[in-house]
Amino acid sequence: MQFNSRKHLYLKLQRQHMYKHRNMGIISKLLVLILIIGFSACTQESDQTNNLKLWYTQPATDWQSEALPIGNGFVGAMFFGGVHIEQIQFSEGTLWSGGPGSGKEYNYGVKKDAWKYLAEVRRLLDEGKMEAAHALANKELTGAMHKEAGSKYSFGNYGAQQTMGDLFIEVKHKGKVTDYTRELDIENAEGRVNYTIGDVDYSRTYFGSYPAKTMVYQFESTKATEYSLAYKTPHTKSKETFSNSTYSFQGFVADNGMQFETCLKFETDGTIVFKDGKITVSGAKHVNIYHVAATDYIGSYPSYNGNNYVVANKKVLQNIEGQSYDELRASHREDYSELFNRVQLDLGENKIDTLATDARLYAYAEGKTDAGLEELYFQYSRYLMIAASRPGGMPMHLQGKWNNSTNPAWACDYHMNINQQMLYWATEVTNLSECHTPLFDYMETLVKPGRITAKEFFNTRGWTVNTMNNPFGYTSPGWRFPWGFYPAGAGWLCQHLWEHYEFTQDNQFLEQTAYPMMKEAALFWIDYLIEDENGYLVSAPSYSPEHGGISRGASMDHQIAWDLLNNCIAASEILDIDKDFRNEAVNIRDKISPPTIGSWGQLQEWKEDVDDPESKHRHVSHLFALHPGKQISLHKTPELAEAAKVSLNARGDEGTGWSLAWKTNFWARLKDGDRAYKLYRRLLFPATIKGERLMGQGSGTFSNLFCAHPPFQLDGNMGGAAGITEMLLQSHTGTLEILPALPSVWKTGSVKGLKARGGFEVDIKWSNGMLQQVEIKSEKDSVCKVRHKEIEQEIRLKAGEKVMLTY
Ligand code: FUC
């Protein structure tokens, strides 16, 4: 509909241009018409109202797989929708155990002068004494983590992300429940619970407001009702008060003393009484609860505390004073939809949206086509990103902002050898650039401790971060190898800085934020790489993420160093600075050991040709150059792309949640749409049915559409969304490739509002598997290269100008 009406308008403005077409043979078969269609803002309306909901006919009983997430960028909450007792579990991004407050043993993981053992490890590697090299590295180059004997906490003084607690809201009613629904409307970012008992209707509405920095829960009934609310937390209470209809709980995390406060402000037509730690509201047709939370954490080395959390909460509450529930809801919706509505996806007619989401997932697993579910998963990732990652807040961790434990899997931390990066793969391309900001702010806090890590473990300049990272500056290698050694973490993170620039063309960001961090991360590699007997620069020692043994060196390290230096060179050219550094970077980049094809046609994971064709390991790190890197592509390096295909085929089509998502992206970059789609479908396979794990591993998707590693990890959701975009639009080679890997099952469809590198916004429409129309809008005056199949064109665009290509 949108396309037709706008086309009508644009026809008046049309101006036909002749452009240079490469490959004229194809042109004769495919007519490409280019229309300049004026200057226009992106479309904000959505066409897909009914499909953008997760809904269920029963309350959740399991947090991880059934409860539904809401968030405001700072707090993540999960609601269960119980009829008699509602449970709202919540966590705040900065609440952690471990770190400086946990005792003098905590030292950011640093082992002073550990680098003194580097030369010996390298000598052993030169002599091919791999076991001895590993033993020494594992003893001397590991980071320090202290854990008391018998501690039930897996990560000792490294700490872990913490739940802040649960609200239990008892609703005092009796009788048979009918017409129960529990839903998450991702078009409006609102959770709802509705049911009827007798002739009384009950409804609840939940949302997280970013502009108000508040979580909002509303309980309504058509007859006056009584409620009783209790807050339960695993942390220690220091003070509990209730005044002016506002409950405050101040407490601290036992092991490090981190202080926090959670406040609940009530607004009701009933009567409120606070007694014995419980808040009772009686005679109420409505109860509105405004929930705010803060901690004393600040992202600043070395102490990481000092935030006046009580004052911070007070300010937030003062700010919403005088705003009605409806006003808060309206400002939330406005804020959310400005971001969410930027992208619309339509993958065709087949949509089973008459089934509840859990049943829908099972139907899909039985082989039903459901383009609507595939769209929903994509848009849900965008919803989750907006709920979890907003300027001013912490970046998403392994579970985004949703953690219900004091001892979560992998500390619910920042994992830098794939997970943290994958969490943000979809951000730019799905037009949510602003949501990238928390990652960049966080990276800035890593530079100071990361410099110490670079110095003490590697004797280099620059900064780095290894596999596991907490928000208290633990940038050291992990405490055991192979998993813990990964100094490439910073280099990979820096790819996000560069990509943010590429997508937004924001020169100020490049100059002030991105380039300084990129350059310092590059200094690490300039110093760390050593020359081998063939004159190549190699990373030694190195481990390919969590796979195989110690090496001289792991291909991923080389590819990341190449990517980083390459981006630094481009950035310094754009900024016209640092000529000497640039020349050095060019020299180093060109000497780095290049991607190599091994004995069975595979892309080598290590410099040594030792890949095991039987390995099904989840990490496919040596394909970084294919995705998310750009060193290998079908067009520019076809032989290497072929080798990547051989490696990928050997690894197979199974894996943990995020691994399936990564493979989706790989196959899309290899332009095999059907294979990418197969992986995407596999990602959406239900992980459990009624608590029972499926497919052995249980990887896939839970009923609440959270990605199952298992356990729940948000990276797979985001990686899956990125995979969809890679099938529809690619721009990493400097050319906008339209429908590079369209699966045959998506016969007719459209996508609007995707972003491409170079500052372009792209709308695509296809029918019967054939591209019909592309609209491209440019941020700035530029020349845009566009390719569809073998047709390549160059189009000149002015800032704000929009062009339509019809095929
Ligand atoms: C990486 C992976 C694991 C898991 C963990 C959080 O180390 O190897 O599979 O996802 O991160």
Image (tube, rainbow, N blue to C red):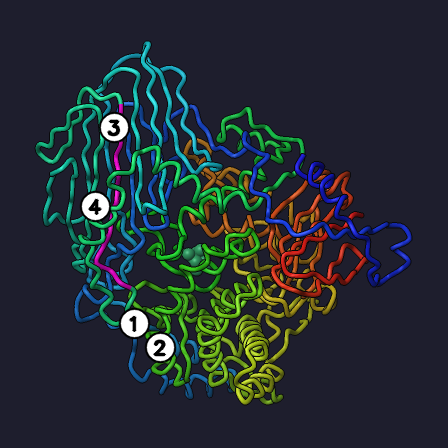
Q: In the figure, is residue 263 to the left or right of 699?
A: left
Nearer the observer: mark 4 or 2; the answer is 4
Nearer the observer: mark 3 or 4; the answer is 3
Proximity of marks 4 and 2: CB atoms separated by less than 8 Å: no
Question: Residue type at mark 2?
Answer: Thr
Above or below, 212 against 324 in this view is: below
Name the foreground residue: 430 vs 153.
430
Q: Which residue is mark 1?
A: 109
Lower position in the chain sequence, tag 1 or tag 4: 1
Q: Main secondary structure of the magenta part?
A: strand
Above or below, 546 against 538 in this view is: above
Q: Gap in Å between the C-alphas at discs 4 and 2?
A: 35 Å
Residue at x 20%, y 21% (from the top left corner): 226
Question: Residue type at mark 1?
Answer: Gly
Stretch of the chain drawn in magenta: 286-298
Q: Which residue is mark 3?
A: 287
Question: Residue type at mark 3?
Answer: Val
Q: Which residue is mark 4?
A: 262
Q: Is residue 421 magenta?
A: no
Lower position in the chain sequence, tag 2 or tag 1: 1
For label 1, the crowd category at 10 Å Cα-Cα, with few meaning under 14, some 14 to 19 and many 20 or more, is many
Q: Which residue is mark 2?
A: 453
Lower position in the chain sequence, tag 3 or tag 2: 3
Point out residue 81 in the picture as x, y percentages from the top left corner: 34, 29
Q: Gap in Å between the C-alphas at discs 3 and 2?
A: 51 Å
Proximity of marks 2 and 1: CB atoms separated by less than 8 Å: yes
For label 2, the crowd category at 10 Å Cα-Cα, with few meaning under 14, some 14 to 19 and many 20 or more, is many
Lower position in the chain sequence, tag 3 or tag 1: 1
Point out residue 467 in the picture as x, y percentages from the top left corner: 41, 66
